[in-house]
Amino acid sequence: IQKLEPIYSGKAKTIYTTNDPAKYIAEFRDSLTAFNGDKKSEAPKKGYYNAQISRKIFEMLEENGIKTHYQGMASDVDMIVDIVDIVKLEVIVRNIAAGSITKKYPMPAGKVFEKPIVVFDFKSDEYQDPMINEDIAYALGVATYEEMASLKETALKINSILVPYFDKNGYLLPDFKLEFGRVNGQIVLADEISCDTCRIWDKVTKESFDKDIFRFDKGDLTKAYETVAKKLVPEIFE
Ligand code: C5P
Protein backbone atom coordinates (compact mmCIF):
# COMPACT_ATOMS: atom_id res chain seq x y z
CA ILE A 1 0.00 0.00 0.00
CA GLN A 2 1.27 3.49 -0.83
CA LYS A 3 0.75 6.66 1.14
CA LEU A 4 -0.38 9.44 -1.20
CA GLU A 5 -1.80 12.86 -0.25
CA PRO A 6 -2.51 14.17 3.26
CA ILE A 7 -6.20 15.04 3.35
CA TYR A 8 -6.81 15.83 6.99
CA SER A 9 -4.58 16.74 9.90
CA GLY A 10 -6.06 16.34 13.37
CA LYS A 11 -4.51 17.02 16.75
CA ALA A 12 -2.37 13.89 16.88
CA LYS A 13 -2.77 12.12 13.53
CA THR A 14 -2.61 12.96 9.84
CA ILE A 15 -4.83 11.07 7.42
CA TYR A 16 -3.48 10.18 3.97
CA THR A 17 -5.14 8.82 0.88
CA THR A 18 -3.59 5.63 -0.51
CA ASN A 19 -3.54 3.72 -3.78
CA ASP A 20 -6.37 1.59 -2.34
CA PRO A 21 -9.67 3.48 -2.86
CA ALA A 22 -11.17 1.87 0.26
CA LYS A 23 -8.31 2.64 2.65
CA TYR A 24 -6.58 5.55 4.31
CA ILE A 25 -3.35 5.65 6.27
CA ALA A 26 -3.46 7.31 9.70
CA GLU A 27 -0.02 8.59 10.66
CA PHE A 28 0.47 8.94 14.42
CA ARG A 29 2.43 12.14 15.11
CA ASP A 30 4.42 13.32 18.14
CA SER A 31 2.23 16.40 18.61
CA LEU A 32 0.00 16.79 21.66
CA THR A 33 -2.87 19.11 22.42
CA ALA A 34 -5.11 19.52 25.44
CA PHE A 35 -7.88 21.81 26.67
CA ASN A 36 -9.46 22.18 23.22
CA GLY A 37 -6.15 22.94 21.56
CA ASP A 38 -5.16 25.73 23.98
CA LYS A 39 -2.14 23.76 25.19
CA LYS A 40 0.21 22.34 22.56
CA SER A 41 3.49 20.44 22.60
CA GLU A 42 5.53 17.63 21.09
CA ALA A 43 6.91 14.51 22.77
CA PRO A 44 9.54 12.38 21.04
CA LYS A 45 8.35 8.87 20.06
CA LYS A 46 4.83 9.58 21.32
CA GLY A 47 3.36 8.79 17.88
CA TYR A 48 5.30 5.54 17.72
CA TYR A 49 4.21 4.28 21.15
CA ASN A 50 0.58 5.28 20.61
CA ALA A 51 0.49 3.67 17.16
CA GLN A 52 1.86 0.40 18.53
CA ILE A 53 -0.39 0.38 21.61
CA SER A 54 -3.42 1.19 19.46
CA ARG A 55 -2.50 -1.53 16.95
CA LYS A 56 -2.21 -4.09 19.74
CA ILE A 57 -5.54 -3.09 21.29
CA PHE A 58 -7.36 -3.16 17.92
CA GLU A 59 -5.93 -6.63 17.19
CA MET A 60 -6.97 -7.83 20.63
CA LEU A 61 -10.49 -6.39 20.27
CA GLU A 62 -10.88 -7.97 16.80
CA GLU A 63 -9.95 -11.34 18.35
CA ASN A 64 -12.77 -10.70 20.81
CA GLY A 65 -15.37 -10.05 18.12
CA ILE A 66 -15.28 -6.23 17.96
CA LYS A 67 -15.28 -4.85 14.41
CA THR A 68 -12.70 -2.07 13.91
CA HIS A 69 -11.35 0.06 11.07
CA TYR A 70 -7.87 -1.41 11.66
CA GLN A 71 -6.36 -3.13 8.61
CA GLY A 72 -2.68 -3.45 9.50
CA MET A 73 0.42 -1.28 9.66
CA ALA A 74 2.30 0.30 6.74
CA SER A 75 5.19 1.39 9.02
CA ASP A 76 5.85 1.82 12.75
CA VAL A 77 3.62 4.91 12.87
CA ASP A 78 1.36 4.40 9.84
CA MET A 79 -1.89 2.54 10.47
CA ILE A 80 -3.89 1.25 7.49
CA VAL A 81 -7.59 1.83 8.12
CA ASP A 82 -10.88 1.38 6.29
CA ILE A 83 -12.32 4.64 4.99
CA VAL A 84 -15.27 5.27 7.27
CA ASP A 85 -17.82 7.98 7.67
CA ILE A 86 -17.08 9.14 11.23
CA VAL A 87 -20.06 9.21 13.61
CA LYS A 88 -19.89 12.66 15.19
CA LEU A 89 -19.79 11.32 18.73
CA GLU A 90 -17.18 10.74 21.39
CA VAL A 91 -18.26 7.76 23.42
CA ILE A 92 -16.67 7.92 26.87
CA VAL A 93 -16.66 5.03 29.29
CA ARG A 94 -15.83 5.67 32.94
CA ASN A 95 -14.98 3.15 35.66
CA ILE A 96 -13.35 5.50 38.19
CA ALA A 97 -14.07 9.22 38.59
CA ALA A 98 -11.34 11.41 37.06
CA GLY A 99 -11.09 14.48 34.87
CA SER A 100 -14.13 16.44 33.72
CA ILE A 101 -16.75 14.35 35.55
CA THR A 102 -15.24 15.37 38.91
CA LYS A 103 -15.80 19.03 37.97
CA LYS A 104 -19.38 18.63 36.76
CA TYR A 105 -20.85 16.37 39.47
CA PRO A 106 -20.16 15.61 43.12
CA MET A 107 -17.95 12.68 42.21
CA PRO A 108 -14.57 12.88 43.95
CA ALA A 109 -11.53 11.80 41.92
CA GLY A 110 -10.75 8.14 42.51
CA LYS A 111 -14.34 7.11 43.31
CA VAL A 112 -14.92 3.63 41.85
CA PHE A 113 -18.28 3.43 40.10
CA GLU A 114 -20.53 0.52 40.97
CA LYS A 115 -21.23 0.08 37.26
CA PRO A 116 -19.46 1.69 34.29
CA ILE A 117 -20.80 5.05 33.10
CA VAL A 118 -21.22 5.69 29.36
CA VAL A 119 -21.42 9.30 28.19
CA PHE A 120 -21.94 10.60 24.64
CA ASP A 121 -20.38 13.90 23.62
CA PHE A 122 -21.19 15.65 20.34
CA LYS A 123 -17.90 15.82 18.42
CA SER A 124 -17.65 19.50 17.55
CA ASP A 125 -14.71 21.86 18.08
CA GLU A 126 -17.05 24.78 17.43
CA TYR A 127 -19.45 23.75 20.23
CA GLN A 128 -16.69 22.28 22.45
CA ASP A 129 -17.96 18.70 22.46
CA PRO A 130 -21.10 19.13 24.59
CA MET A 131 -22.66 16.09 26.20
CA ILE A 132 -25.68 14.81 24.25
CA ASN A 133 -28.35 12.14 24.66
CA GLU A 134 -30.15 9.99 22.09
CA ASP A 135 -32.88 12.59 21.44
CA ILE A 136 -30.34 15.32 20.63
CA ALA A 137 -28.27 12.87 18.57
CA TYR A 138 -31.40 11.97 16.61
CA ALA A 139 -32.45 15.61 16.17
CA LEU A 140 -28.95 16.47 14.91
CA GLY A 141 -28.97 13.53 12.50
CA VAL A 142 -25.86 12.16 14.21
CA ALA A 143 -27.23 8.68 14.99
CA THR A 144 -30.52 6.79 15.22
CA TYR A 145 -31.95 5.46 18.48
CA GLU A 146 -30.97 1.93 17.47
CA GLU A 147 -27.42 3.06 16.72
CA MET A 148 -27.12 4.88 20.06
CA ALA A 149 -28.26 1.73 21.87
CA SER A 150 -25.82 -0.43 19.95
CA LEU A 151 -22.96 2.06 20.50
CA LYS A 152 -23.56 1.91 24.23
CA GLU A 153 -23.65 -1.89 24.19
CA THR A 154 -20.43 -2.05 22.13
CA ALA A 155 -18.70 0.50 24.38
CA LEU A 156 -19.56 -1.59 27.45
CA LYS A 157 -18.37 -4.77 25.73
CA ILE A 158 -15.07 -3.05 24.86
CA ASN A 159 -14.79 -1.92 28.48
CA SER A 160 -15.31 -5.47 29.70
CA ILE A 161 -12.42 -6.58 27.46
CA LEU A 162 -10.08 -3.67 28.22
CA VAL A 163 -10.40 -3.58 32.03
CA PRO A 164 -9.04 -7.12 32.58
CA TYR A 165 -6.46 -6.59 29.83
CA PHE A 166 -5.04 -3.51 31.57
CA ASP A 167 -5.41 -5.18 34.97
CA LYS A 168 -3.23 -8.12 34.00
CA ASN A 169 -0.60 -5.62 32.82
CA GLY A 170 -0.65 -3.81 36.17
CA TYR A 171 -2.94 -0.90 35.35
CA LEU A 172 -6.34 0.52 36.22
CA LEU A 173 -8.44 2.00 33.41
CA PRO A 174 -10.42 4.89 34.96
CA ASP A 175 -11.85 6.03 31.62
CA PHE A 176 -11.36 6.13 27.87
CA LYS A 177 -12.83 7.62 24.72
CA LEU A 178 -14.06 5.76 21.63
CA GLU A 179 -15.01 6.90 18.16
CA PHE A 180 -16.96 4.95 15.59
CA GLY A 181 -17.45 5.10 11.84
CA ARG A 182 -19.83 3.74 9.22
CA VAL A 183 -18.56 1.47 6.48
CA ASN A 184 -20.61 -0.79 4.18
CA GLY A 185 -23.74 -0.23 6.25
CA GLN A 186 -22.17 -1.21 9.55
CA ILE A 187 -20.68 0.70 12.46
CA VAL A 188 -17.08 -0.13 13.38
CA LEU A 189 -14.69 1.11 16.04
CA ALA A 190 -12.45 3.84 14.56
CA ASP A 191 -9.80 6.40 15.58
CA GLU A 192 -7.32 5.08 18.17
CA ILE A 193 -7.13 3.62 21.67
CA SER A 194 -3.89 4.79 23.23
CA CYS A 195 -2.30 6.66 26.12
CA ASP A 196 -3.76 9.85 24.58
CA THR A 197 -7.36 8.61 24.73
CA CYS A 198 -7.40 6.58 27.96
CA ARG A 199 -6.66 7.27 31.60
CA ILE A 200 -4.19 4.60 32.68
CA TRP A 201 -3.16 4.42 36.36
CA ASP A 202 -0.62 2.21 38.06
CA LYS A 203 -2.70 -0.28 40.05
CA VAL A 204 -0.66 0.22 43.21
CA THR A 205 0.55 3.84 43.20
CA LYS A 206 -2.38 5.29 41.13
CA GLU A 207 0.24 7.25 39.19
CA SER A 208 -0.83 8.45 35.70
CA PHE A 209 0.64 6.84 32.58
CA ASP A 210 -1.45 8.82 30.09
CA LYS A 211 -2.04 12.28 28.62
CA ASP A 212 -2.78 13.73 32.08
CA ILE A 213 1.03 13.90 32.39
CA PHE A 214 0.95 16.53 29.64
CA ARG A 215 -2.32 18.18 30.71
CA PHE A 216 -1.10 18.74 34.27
CA ASP A 217 2.72 18.79 33.79
CA LYS A 218 3.17 15.59 35.81
CA GLY A 219 6.54 14.51 34.37
CA ASP A 220 8.13 12.77 31.41
CA LEU A 221 5.40 11.75 28.97
CA THR A 222 7.63 9.78 26.60
CA LYS A 223 8.97 7.72 29.50
CA ALA A 224 5.45 6.96 30.77
CA TYR A 225 4.15 5.93 27.32
CA GLU A 226 7.26 3.80 26.86
CA THR A 227 6.53 2.07 30.20
CA VAL A 228 3.00 1.22 29.03
CA ALA A 229 4.32 0.09 25.63
CA LYS A 230 6.85 -2.23 27.34
CA LYS A 231 3.94 -3.95 29.08
CA LEU A 232 1.40 -4.01 26.22
CA VAL A 233 3.71 -4.43 23.20
CA PRO A 234 6.93 -5.99 24.57
CA GLU A 235 7.72 -7.38 21.09
CA ILE A 236 8.73 -3.93 19.78
CA PHE A 237 11.57 -3.76 22.32
CA GLU A 238 13.14 -7.10 21.36
O1 C5P B 1 -11.69 15.15 29.84
P1 C5P B 1 -12.46 13.99 30.35
O2 C5P B 1 -12.19 13.69 31.79
O3 C5P B 1 -13.93 14.10 30.06
O4 C5P B 1 -11.95 12.74 29.51
C1 C5P B 1 -12.45 11.43 29.70
C2 C5P B 1 -11.58 10.45 28.89
O5 C5P B 1 -11.78 10.63 27.51
C3 C5P B 1 -10.09 10.61 29.13
O6 C5P B 1 -9.48 9.32 29.09
C4 C5P B 1 -9.62 11.44 27.96
O7 C5P B 1 -8.28 11.18 27.62
C5 C5P B 1 -10.57 10.99 26.85
N1 C5P B 1 -10.88 12.05 25.90
C6 C5P B 1 -10.32 12.03 24.62
N2 C5P B 1 -10.61 13.01 23.72
C7 C5P B 1 -11.45 14.01 24.03
C8 C5P B 1 -12.02 14.06 25.32
C9 C5P B 1 -11.73 13.05 26.23
O8 C5P B 1 -9.56 11.10 24.30
N3 C5P B 1 -11.73 14.94 23.13
Image: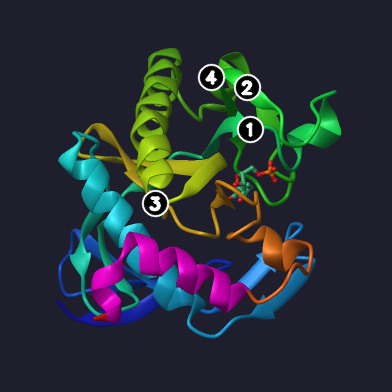
Q: Which residue is mark 3?
A: 169
Which residue occupies 76% across, 58% down? 35
Residue 12: x %, y % from top left? 53, 69
- The numbered mark at residue 96 is 1
- Whether residue 212 is visible to the viewer of this picture, yes or no, is yes
Q: CA distance from mark 1 to mark 2?
A: 6 Å
User: Which badge, 4 or 3, comes first in the chain's sequence?
Assistant: 4
Q: Amino acid at mark 3?
A: Asn
Relative horizontal placement of residue 10, taking residue 71 as reference (left or right) = right
Range covered by the magenta-colored residues: 221-237
Image quadrant where residue 5 sits: bottom left
Relative horizontal placement of residue 57, taking residue 21 as reference (left or right) = right
Q: CA distance from mark 3 to mark 2?
A: 21 Å
Q: Is label 3 in a helix, a strand or a loop?
A: loop
Q: Amino acid at mark 1?
A: Ile
User: Which badge, 3 or 1, comes first in the chain's sequence?
Assistant: 1
Residue 60: x %, y % from top left? 24, 47
User: Which badge, 1 or 4, comes first in the chain's sequence?
Assistant: 1
Q: Is label 2 in a helix, a strand or a loop?
A: strand
Q: Which residue is mark 2?
A: 113
- Pointers 1 and 2 in contact (C-beta within 8 Å): yes
Which residue occupies 74% across, 57% down? 36
Q: Label 1: how many residues lie within 10 Å, few (<14), some (14-19) or many (20+)?
A: many
Q: Which residue is mark 4?
A: 138
User: Which badge, 1 or 2, comes first in the chain's sequence?
Assistant: 1
Q: CA distance from mark 2 to mark 4?
A: 28 Å
